[in-house]
Image (tube, rainbow, N blue to C red):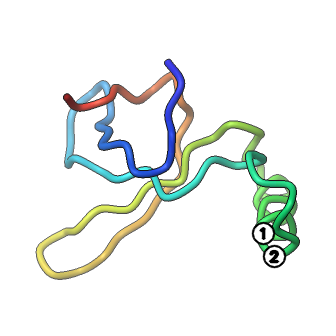
Amino acid sequence: MEFKIGDIVQLKSGGPQMSVQRIVGSDSSNLLIKAADEFMKSQGFRENDIVCQWFNGNKLESGTFKAEGLIKVE
């Protein structure tokens, strides 16, 4: 499944609903995002990994996930 920024997703195994913030490697025109993506790749992440955000109570959380492990919430 292909995801886009703003999609609401959830881990296939369950958990909170999350919003897609960005997709690693999808915006090569923005130098800051490109630099951030290169840093993420140096930490073991890959092209097309999905950066998500969600709230845990009042605290904003974020994480990066493989697209294969997510489903889109309708």
Question: Front-most of 53 and 28?
Answer: 28
Q: Where's the C terminus, which quadrant?
A: top left
Q: Secondary structure at mark 1?
A: helix
Q: Badge 2: few (under 14), some or many (20 or more) residues near its Cα, within 10 Å?
A: few
Q: Are marks 1 and 2 in contact (CB under 8 Å)?
A: yes
Residue found 76% across the figure and 41% down from its top? 46
- The image shows residue 4 at horizontal and vertical percentages of 51, 40
Q: Position of residue 66 (x, y in %)?
A: 56, 34
> Residue 71: x percent and y percent?
34, 26
Q: Is 65 situated above or below 13?
A: below
Residue position marked by numbered label 2 in the rendering: 32
User: Which residue is labeled 1 in the image?
Assistant: 36
Quarter location, residue 38: bottom right
Q: In the displayed orientation, state which residue is furthest to the left.
A: 57
Q: CA distance from mark 1 to mark 2?
A: 6 Å
Relative horizontal placement of residue 5, taking residue 36 as reference (left or right): left
Q: Residue at x 11, y 74 (%)?
A: 57
In this view, the residue farthest toward the top is 1
Q: Residue at x 77, y 39 (%)?
A: 47
Vertical placement of residue 59 versus 44, above or below: below
Looking at the image, which residue is at 32% across and 39% down? 9
Q: As displayed, is residue 58 above or below residue 9?
A: below
Please identify the residue farthest to the front as the structure is shown: 29
The x, y position of residue 14, in whole percent, is 21, 33
- Three-letter code for the amino acid on which mark 1 is drawn: Ala
* Left or right: 53 in relation to 57: right
Position of residue 59 relative to residue 65, above or below, is: below
Q: Which of pointers 1 and 2 indicates the residue nearer the eye?
A: 2
Q: Identify the mark at residue 47; answer none if there is no mark.
A: none
Label count reads 2
Q: Amino acid at mark 2?
A: Leu
